[in-house]
Image (cartoon, rainbow, N blue to C red):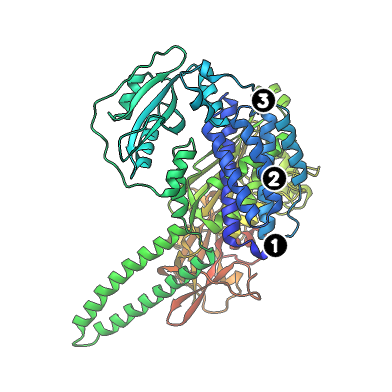
Amino acid sequence: MSSSVFTPELIAEAQEIVDALNSDLIVAESEARAGIVDPDRINGLFRSAHSLKGISGMFGLSGVSRLAHDLESLLDGMRLGKVQLDANALDVLFSCVERFGALIAAAAEGDENLEVGVDELVVRLKNVTSGDVGVGKTELTALVDLSADVVSVLTEYEEHRLRENLKKDRNLFMLRSAFDLSNFDVGLAEIDAAVKPLGEVITKLPSSKPGESGTIAFDIIVGSDSDAESLASAISDDRVEVIPIGKRGATQRAAVAAPVAATPLAPSTEESAALLTSPEADEGATIRSVSRTVRVDIRRLDRLMNLVGELGLTRMAFEKIGEGFRRLQGFTGLAAELHKEGRNFERRLTELQAGIMEVRMVPLANLFERMVRIGRKVSRELNREVRIEVSGEGTELDKLIVEDLADPLMHLVRNAIDHGIEAPEDREANGKPREGMVRLTATARGNHVLVVVSDDGGGIDVARALESAVQKGLVTPERAAELTRREVFNLLLLPGFSTRSEVSEYSGRGVGMDVVKTKISQLSGIVDIDSEPGRGTTVTITLPITLAIIPALIVIVAGETYAIPLNNVQETLALEPSLVRTIENREVISVRGTTVPLVDLRGIFHIDGKGRPDLPYGVIAGVGQNATALVVDELVGQQDIVIKSLGRRLRKVPGIAGAAELGNQKTILVIDMVELIDEMARGGGDGRA
């Protein structure tokens, strides 16, 4: 089938299903380690596989459909207790999820070969399925007080759940109630919700005992550790009979006199069908959430954001018109009214901007879950015992930033396992637990998000890192002797740096951390490394929440106007002559005990014009040892800007992120402070102040 059929909507929906599979599988693995197999979790996996099979088969993704079919068979075996969720099964399940992601990505790129790796996984799935022996059929009527007619209509899965409850020595009950035909689905949903905290709804069957005219009766079989009175109290509906069933129980009826709960609006027909056919009470909620979701191409949101930027320029134009009216006699009243409406317009514009930004934001959960899967695979293939923990996965970032963060984050996770975590035997010899730990955390701080990848491995050998840097010519022996511990870690971010002589399949071919630094710099982010020998390494990535529309500091240098994104700016200060010192022919200032070098745009951009004023300003960017002060002549103020590309010819100008419009047909350059600092560190410009 032509790849043109694979629409963005199809790809997005398929990827959502794969993300759901991955999320449930990660939790299922964690539960399995604790000896827990949650039937709801297995059902969720089964439903996702079934949905993926359906959508992929409908649109001609034959490889995905075929693999999903066999995955569905394996999960069905798990639902029925015929297949165990052991390490072997988990390995195959994770491999399937990884292959689904690769095939869907290939379809999105227009690749016609969408069968790669499927045959091998199909064989592995069949081997796992055939390796377990099915349970024999036991006469349930001998174990519970159910008629043969009722048992005969139970599905294989319902029969399995009944056996599981018996194995766990749970009490079994039949809940019998009649509901109005007009809203019986609402009544069933209410009972489902009331019972779920106390046990499991095994099945819902139309009762053999007819109800009154205009009603329909149901028999609901429930397994619970609670007694009949507790169950009846939780249901709180005198129309419901709670009947204990089982080998021990004589049939007893417990009814609780309580007011009937208010009836909510009836769900849709699709939801009613789901309640009757699925053991999950939240199936209807899933249908509702999907129906309320709209997929929007991010480029449309970009266009909307550009329009917001244009409206901001229009607002400033109106302000200038108002200023003109205020200077004219007889127009002060009109000017005041124009100013008032301008303020209202500004508030609405701010709300519109915030609304569009909210639509662009996505949580980091899916990205973190992908990293867990990747880390699991790498640790298994390297024979490392590693547990990966995540926190702050609900933290949100612009979708485009999250997508571009995937590759550097994957490199860091692989690097932590390959270079950081020691072999289990070595860890034991050093008094550590055999199992290493890699943590992914995300924290929101104002307009930034901190993403941290840390491990409890061997850490970085500072002496070895310095030796490698000197050998590669990245630093002179004299300079190496003067470097602080943090400055040594910054050397790891330079191109070509590596302390490993052998090639690694997992964390690069000696490329090192510069690939991470480059990508994060493109996102206007900062990378910081800290490490302690024997205790581990921490890499902190600081990112702006969005790059779409950003607040900027407008400055003037040598008569030219520039914009500096505020997410790069730490503070500004007047450069009093007494603050400026000279070290090794370079001007520096001291900011709260930290020596910060001064950088002048005149030297970097070779700007001709009037010299520096007597009292310039310093714009400090970066953190700690990475901080740099950009010397500017004037601070004009703050303004929201939309950064626009300079085009192909000017796209690679060092230190320039793009252009922005200020109004009055004036376009200015936007300074990329992160790249500017890097360029100075590499000696790419004479920015001596």
Question: Quarter of the image holding residue 678?
Answer: bottom right
Proximity of marks 1 and 3: CB atoms separated by less than 8 Å? no
**How much space separates mark 1 and mark 3, taking CA atoms?**
42 Å
Secondary structure under tag 3 reads loop
Classify mark 2: residues with Cα within 10 Å, few (<14), some (14-19) or many (20+): many
Lower position in the chain sequence, tag 2 or tag 3: 2
Secondary structure under tag 1 reads loop
Residue 292, percent from left and from top:
43, 55
Which residue in the protein does label 3 denote? 134
Q: Residue at x 60, y 60 (%)?
A: 522
Check disc 1 and give the amino acid type.
Gly
**How much space separates mark 1 and mark 2, taking CA atoms?**
20 Å
Residue 485, percent from left and from top:
62, 42
Q: Nearer the viewer, mark 1 or mark 2?
A: 2
Quadrant of image for the N terminus:
bottom right
Secondary structure under tag 2 reads helix
Question: Quarter of the image holding residue 488?
Answer: top right
Residue 76, percent from left and from top:
62, 35
Left or right placement of residue 645 versus residue 328 in this view: right
Query: Is residue 341 at least partly visible in the picture?
Result: yes
Residue 588, percent from left and from top:
54, 58
Check disc 2 and give the amino acid type.
Leu
Which residue in the protein does label 1 denote? 110
Which residue in the protein does label 2 denote? 67
Q: Residue at x 47, y 13 (%)?
A: 247
Name the foreground residue: 577 vs 538. Answer: 538
Quadrant of image for the C terminus:
bottom right
Q: Residue at x 64, y 23 (%)?
A: 135
Q: Is residue 466 above or below residue 4?
A: above
Name the foreground residue: 93 vs 482. Answer: 93
Q: Nearer the viewer, mark 1 or mark 3?
A: 3
